[in-house]
Image (cartoon, grey):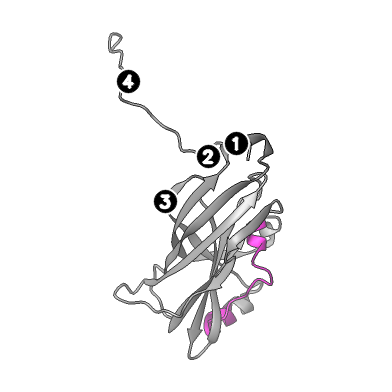
Amino acid sequence: MRDSEITKFLVSFSGQIEYVSFPGGVFDDQLCVHYEVVWGPDWSPMSGLTSGTSQMARSGVDPERVVFNFPLEIVFSSTNVSGWPQLLVTVRAQNTLSGDALRGYSLLLMPPTPGHLLTSAPLLRPRAATVLGEWLAWITGKYPELADPKMLASGKDNYLLRTESYGSVSATLNMISKDFRKLGYDNQPPFYNTSNTTYNTSNR
């Protein structure tokens, strides 16, 4: 296909959600993560899974970390970079007393440049609207949940939310692109050539 006939570029994302960490320690019996890839209107998934749920896991040697190593892989096509895909992660807990309960949401931007990226994002959970609601959430271990967590990716109505940070989610992500430059985009990291650099010290 000639360059003038190319109207879309391809982007492949792969990697894994490595672990969830809580600075104060993990007090739940078991945790699981659910991921969902969110993208703009000009993007179309070509292959791979746009969502998935991990196995149940618990903390091991490190009492502040729960390891999942949950893989993900997806390929997109698009006509422009607006609406770049984001990874929305929901962390849930299973307890004998409270049953299934939310532990928080985390939003990570998919890598915009080729290569391997180790990234992390804070884990946020909504706060109750009243003091009584916050007290009940603390007693029962059940916190308010969003009817549509995808709203976190748009940012349109997020200013209405009252949230608190509680831990973080870490992931390793890889990105490969095709036909980016043919459509006028340059997502290559800058190259610095220091081999021919000279320093003028005459004015020192």
Query: Which residue occupies 67% across, 45% down?
Result: 79
Residue 55 position (above or below residue 109):
below
Instruction: Residue under label 2, please give it.
Output: 187
- Mark pair 4, 3: CA separation: 28 Å
Q: Is residue 29 left or right of residue 80?
A: left
Q: Secondary structure at mark 3?
A: strand
Asked if residue 122 lies in the magenta stretch, the reply is no
Question: Which numbered disc, 3 or 2, marks the residue that appears first in the sequence?
Answer: 3
Determine which of the numbered discs, if any, sits on residue 197 in the image: 4
The residue nearer to you, when weighing 124 against 72, is 72
Q: Which residue is rendered at x = 62% and y = 64% of the image? A: 162
Where is the N terminus found, in terms of image quarters?
Answer: top right
Q: Bounds of the magenta span?
A: 135-154
Q: Is residue 139 magenta?
A: yes
Q: Nearer the viewer, mark 4 or mark 3?
A: 3
Residue that mark 3 sits on:
116
> In which quarter of the view is residue 185 placed?
top right
**CA separation in Å, label 4 and label 1:** 31 Å
**Mark 1 is on which residue type?**
Lys
